[in-house]
Image (spheres, rainbow, N blue to C red):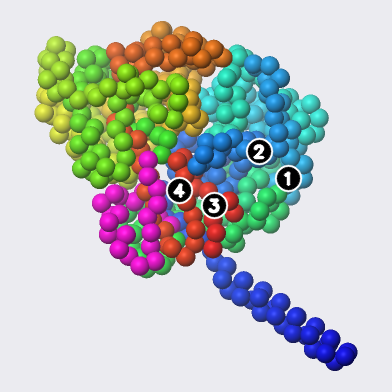
Amino acid sequence: MNCIKKMASLLLVAATCTMGWVAHAEARNLIVAVPSLPPTLEPMGENANRISRVTYSIFETLIRLDQFTGEMLPSLAESWKRIDPRTVEFKLRKGVKFHDGSELTAEDVVFSFGPERFLSEKAPGRILAASFLGVVEKVEAIDPYTVRIHTNVPDPLLENRFASRMAEIISKKAYLAAGGWDKWSQKPVGTGPYKISSFALNNRLDLQRFDGYWDAAAPTEKLSFIEVPELSARIAGLRSGEFDVITELAPDQIATLDNVKNVEVAGGPVENIYGLVFDTLSSPTLKDPRIRQAISHAIDRKAIVDALFMGRTTVANSWQMKTFGNMFFPEMDKEQLNKDLAKKLVKESGYKGDPIVWRLLPGYYTLEVPVTQAIEQMLREVGLNIKLEIKENWEQVEAKTPSRMINNASVTGYYQDPVGQLWRRFKPEAPWRKKDFFTMSQRFDSLGAILESSVDLKERQVAFKGMLEEMAANPTGVPLYMLPMFYAKKTDFQWKAGVMEFMDFSARNLKF
């Protein structure tokens, strides 16, 4: 009997070892090929899709916004409640560890939004984060696991702000140990399922599974983002097996990849309106709103969506999205195409044919060059002399000179309300206005303040409709279509693309 027990024990040990070896053999790393990597990994250091897709694995917010349902779920805060229209109290989850091993406490939350990083005029993160969190007045620790956030006005969307970009929580200890914003920005410390292993600018970001993660462990030991600017190279790498996921797939490549064994396409329109933004301060030509109105009326948005995007996205005739619910107004979303009106406006403006410079960064947005060239031809047909200038980086695109006239841009709806989209991008604290692209009317700013601070639905609806009227009369930006994001991936693992720009590689959304 003892021999039988001993043999059974040995067989159990052998089986356990074999299962462990098989699990180890099946586990593999994941490589994502992207057109470009951000110059910084500090969440408040850049506001662009290239940083959103990588930082989602490194950092977390107090509340998590479900990418598929729009539901707000507990994250670093296990619960929250409204104290009054200007205050929300968060109860932090106990036992959460940062990547440096320190425990998350209220002190870290206070520091994340404190004067060293955000809550002072000269704080390094303020220039970008103010358009998201500008209403925040004070963050205070009630006890080690309780935080209250106060705003300077009543805020109907305060909870949404702390489930979105710029609200990522960082380690106070690690920030201070780094010795400054610049060094910290290259290897910051969060609480996410992956921690930074190495970061080579314009080359590669390697993330490693964080074994101290408070939730389900990341399914892959190593997650790498590799910069591959050329789409053809990304596709070739996917087909050869070098890459597991590629981003910014062009719609005309979808049909081809649909027929490739072990490859599948994911993605579609995201909560982001793609369009144009104008410099009305540096350019004498674009100071006249009639020229900008003419640009909007000259563009055949449906033709672009049908011909270039194979109908896989939708036209945007106004700066609003249907996910706004009772804040969406169909009567303000009428078709803009009217070439006769565009020609009339150009003639009335007294335009003499001076070049209108359009700067772009090729490959940053899906089909950016073909879309720009198509619109260029449409604008020439109504009498506008467009000159395209290809730039190498965003600094060149946004450089303040008289030739800064038209730039491509996107306006993400980080929460399903115009405060998180139109107002965030065009308010006085927004980067475009800080960089002197344009000014807005006093009426627009006054209505925006009402939209952001009122808790009365009717009052907010009236304010937003008025803002849309102002944008039509004085368009500092022109909406075109819902920005689509297409990906291609191997079929030997499960991963879904959400309706935001984030890429979720946590155990919630990645399975081998």
- The magenta span reads 245-269
Asked if marks 3 and 2 touch (Cβ < 8 Å), the reply is: no
Image point (20%, 33%), residue name: 375
* Relative vertical location of residue 288 with respect to residue 414 in this rendering, above or below: above
Q: Which element carries disc 4, helix, strand or loop?
A: loop
Q: Earlier in the sequence, mark 2 or mark 4?
A: 2
- The residues bearing labels 2 and 4 have C-alpha atoms spaced at a distance of 21 Å
Q: Nearer the viewer, residue 392 or 81?
A: 81
Looking at marks 4 and 3 on the same chain, the residue that comes earlier in the sequence is marked by: 4
Label 1 packing within 10 angstroms: few (<14), some (14-19), many (20+):
some
Label 1 sits on a secondary structure element that is loop
- Which mark is nearer the camera, 3 or 1? 3
Q: Which residue is mark 1?
A: 96
* Residue 442 in the image: above or below residue 100: above
Measured from the top left, where is residue 232 in percent x and y?
Answer: 30, 57
- SS of the residue at dot 2? strand
Q: CB atoms at circles 4 and 3 under 8 Å apart?
A: no
Q: Nearer the viewer, mark 1 or mark 4?
A: 4
* Contact between labelled residues 4 and 1, with CB atoms less than 8 Å apart: no
As helix, strand or loop, the secondary structure at mark 3 comes to loop
Splitting the image into 4 quarters, where does residue 382 fall?
top left
Disc 4 to disc 3, C-alpha distance: 9 Å
Residue 255 on the magenta span:
yes
For the point 59% across and 47% down, which residue is it? 58
Please tell me which of labels 1 and 4 falls first in the chain. 1
Type of amino acid at the residue the image marks with label 1 = Val
The residue sitting at the front extreme is 1
Tag of residue 497 = 4
Image position of 99 (left or right of 407): right
Write down the quadrant of residue 357 in the picture: top left
